[in-house]
Image (cartoon, rainbow, N blue to C red):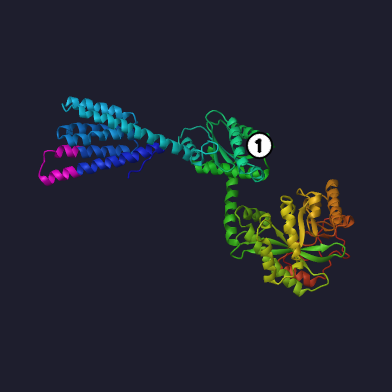
């Protein structure tokens, strides 16, 4: 079949049908010529040759996009042929004459069937084959018209559904990409801009009010976005809560920025949804056509990358694409792809940071922290790859692996150093792990597999994990405590736990987030919050642990506040398994005894990572 070099799918459809018709005519002409040659009849050789050459010309026209011209000439050819054959016999006449009517109704317009039928009847009268029977061509024209019109209507309806979002009626990704590419193609075009809009709190609405309410919200958002655009601009819904906007004839960057700000502001205003006031925001990425390579995919990707950067800065903001963003996105892609392999190729390692009992200065625990030993980039901290693991669905297998490694190491330590206060190893649980239906069975199985006493394991759950569904959290925490496992609420003070729910949580420890510890000594508010959390922990009968202690002044203040435990660079960086084992064997587990370092120094009585 001939390749079509045009964009319109309706024209492509007609071109394909025309190609079939032309191949049919070609086959008929060749067969007829061969039949005449076999019979030795050379009377029509010239006519057959001209017919075949004419069909070849029509095929060439069709190939290079002159489809309407080729269709008109095809109708003229078949009409002329039918009239020339009208003197042969009555059967030939009534077989050949309906053909151009059918072709015209489908390839031109449905009503052109009547025009061709009228011309056929008039032509037949001229060549003296007029007969009342020719009125059957009118019937053929009517049937052709009805069939072609209904077929065309169905096609356009299906095409509209295929190219538009069913919920909002906006163009979908396919139509938007096609429109964008056509806008990019002219070499003398003006500057274009693409906005990539992603709603910030859509999942909260979907999860709390239901998917039907989420659909209503999407429709309201689509209307607000359209209201912010100029005449000729195109808004589309790509998927879920993602929208794009094509801005034609942008004179400068500021023009695109103003429209992005207008959209962000419009979506910040409250929305009336099922009798509730709903507040959402939108992150917007902006990309200009001058930053791309002339393809729709590249420009859309650039806008998406800019939107992702805007999202990391906070809700309801925008960001303009720059080339360094693409480099970061490529690095991110490499990390994501590498992470998938790292979990199964032994590139992940667990490091351990000591937890100190402040009243005695003894090491009473170790927190397990995963690291990635990248073959090219060296040691990568979890802050750089854990978010990717959550995005691509690897956080659960990664967390399971860390938990298993930590349990095995904890068993070795408790066996090697059996003391009056056995060591407790802490492991962080992600939100997705915490919501696993088989979490209890998984942890119980790991404890049996590694032979670790449940009392030697502590699970750290972030405050945001337990503050969402309090009933579910309390039930699961009680079952975990039933196994004998210790529990801690991590990053306390950064979430939204109520005092009532905190009292229900069967935990052993509250961990004060590093952001508050950093302010000790220079921020009265942070000191007050830290003291409040310590007093709150004691009021509900649990320990208070400070994270991220880095100076002697912070340690002294925490001790004066009555904090129970602490960890941080002041005592030790996270250590490899071997280094942590050496630490436990070489130091009598006392880290604060008789040591008075300078205000900002780390404690030299502990070896840093890589020291014996």
Which corner quadrant of the image does residue 168 belong to?
top right
Residue 466 visible, this angle: no
Is residue 274 depicted above or below 536 in this figure?
A: above
Crowding around mark 1 (Cα neighbors within 10 Å: few <14, some 14 to 19, many 20+) is: few
User: 376 and 14: which one is in front?
Assistant: 14
User: Picture coordinates of residue 13 (x, y %)?
Assistant: 37, 39
SS at badge 1:
loop
Is residue 513 depicted above or below 179 in this figure?
A: below
Question: Looking at the image, which residue is at 38% across and 34% down?
Answer: 150
Is residue 563 depicted above or below 484 in this figure?
A: above
Q: Is residue 478 left or right of residue 293?
A: right
Label 1 sits on residue: 274
- Does residue 45 show up magenta in the picture? yes
Question: Looking at the image, which residue is at 23% across and 32% down?
Answer: 79
User: 355 and 408: which one is in front?
Assistant: 408
Residue 417 visible, this angle: yes
Question: Looking at the image, which residue is at 76% across and 56% down?
Answer: 489
The magenta segment is 31-50
Task: For the N terminus, give its image quadrant.
Answer: top left
User: Picture coordinates of residue 522 (x, y %)?
Assistant: 84, 48
Q: Main secondary structure of the magenta part?
A: helix
Task: For the C terminus, give its image quadrant.
Answer: bottom right
Question: Looking at the image, which residue is at 66% across and 39% down?
Answer: 281
User: 95 and 454: which one is in front?
Assistant: 95
């Amino acid at each position: 079949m001939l390749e079509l070099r045009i964009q319109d799918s309706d024209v492509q459809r007609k071109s394909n049908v025309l190609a079939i018709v032309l191949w049919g005519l070609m086959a008929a002409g060749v067969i007829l010529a061969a039949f005449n040659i076999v019979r030795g009849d050379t009377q029509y050789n010239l006519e057959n040759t001209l017919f075949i050459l004419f069909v070849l010309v029509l095929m060439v026209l069709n190939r290079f996009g002159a489809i309407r011209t080729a269709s008109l000439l095809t109708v003229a050819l078949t009409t002329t042929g039918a009239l020339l054959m009208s003197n042969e016999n009555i059967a030939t006449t009534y077989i050949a004459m309906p053909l151009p009517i059918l072709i015209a109704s489908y390839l031109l317009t449905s009503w052109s069937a009547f025009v061709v039928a009228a011309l056929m009847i008039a032509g037949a009268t001229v060549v003296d084959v007029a007969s009342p029977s020719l009125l059957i061509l009118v019937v053929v024209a009517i049937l052709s018209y009805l069939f072609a019109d209904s077929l065309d209507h169905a096609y356009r309806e299906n095409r509209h559904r295929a190219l538009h979002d069913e919920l909002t009626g906006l163009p979908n990704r396919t139509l938007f990409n096609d429109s964008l590419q056509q806008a990019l193609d002219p070499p003398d075009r003006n500057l274009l801009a693409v906005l990539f809009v992603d709603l910030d709190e859509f999942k909260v609405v979907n999860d709390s009010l239901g998917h039907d309410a989420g659909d209503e919200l999407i429709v309201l958002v689509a209307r607000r976005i359209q209201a912010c655009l100029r005449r000729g601009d195109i808004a589309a819904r790509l998927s879920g809560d993602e929208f794009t906007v094509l801005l034609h004839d942008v004179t400068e960057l500021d023009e695109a920025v103003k429209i992005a700000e207008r959209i962000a502001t419009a979506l910040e205003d409250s929305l009336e949804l099922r009798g509730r006031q709903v507040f959402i925001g939108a992150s917007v990425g902006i990309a200009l056509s001058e930053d791309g390579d002339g393809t729709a995919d590249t420009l859309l990707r650039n806008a998406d990358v800019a939107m992702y950067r805007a999202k990391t800065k906070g809700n309801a903001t925008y960001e303009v694409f720059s080339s360094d963003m693409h480099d970061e996105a490529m690095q991110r892609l490499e990390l994501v792809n590498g992470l998938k392999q790292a979990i199964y190729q032994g590139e992940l390692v667990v490091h351990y940071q000591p937890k100190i009992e402040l009243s005695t200065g003894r090491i009473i625990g170790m927190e397990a922290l995963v690291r990635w030993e990248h073959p090219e980039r060296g040691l990568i901290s979890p802050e750089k790859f854990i978010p990717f693991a959550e995005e691509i669905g690897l956080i659960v297998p990664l967390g399971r692996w860390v938990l298993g490694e930590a349990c095995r190491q904890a068993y070795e330590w408790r066996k090697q150093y059996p003391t009056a206060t056995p060591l407790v190893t802490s492991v962080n649980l992600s939100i997705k792990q915490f919501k696993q239906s088989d979490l209890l069975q998984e942890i119980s199985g790991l404890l049996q597999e590694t032979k670790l006493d449940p009392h030697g394991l502590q699970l750290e759950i972030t405050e945001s994990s337990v503050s969402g569904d309090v009933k579910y959290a309390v039930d699961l925490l009680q079952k975990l405590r039933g196994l004998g496992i210790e529990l801690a609420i991590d990053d306390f003070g950064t979430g939204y736990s109520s005092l009532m729910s905190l009292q229900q949580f069967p935990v052993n420890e509250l961990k004060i987030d590093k952001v508050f510890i950093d302010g000790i000594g220079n921020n009265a508010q942070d000191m007050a919050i830290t003291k409040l959390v310590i007093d709150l922990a004691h009021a509900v009968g649990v320990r208070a642990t400070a994270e991220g202690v880095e100076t002697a002044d912070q340690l002294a203040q925490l001790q004066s506040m009555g904090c129970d435990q602490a960890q941080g660079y002041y005592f030790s960086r996270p250590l490899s398994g071997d280094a942590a084992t050496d630490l436990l064997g070489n130091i009598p587990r006392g880290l604060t005894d008789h040591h008075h370092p300078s205000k900002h120094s780390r404690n030299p009585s502990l070896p840093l990572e890589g020291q014996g």
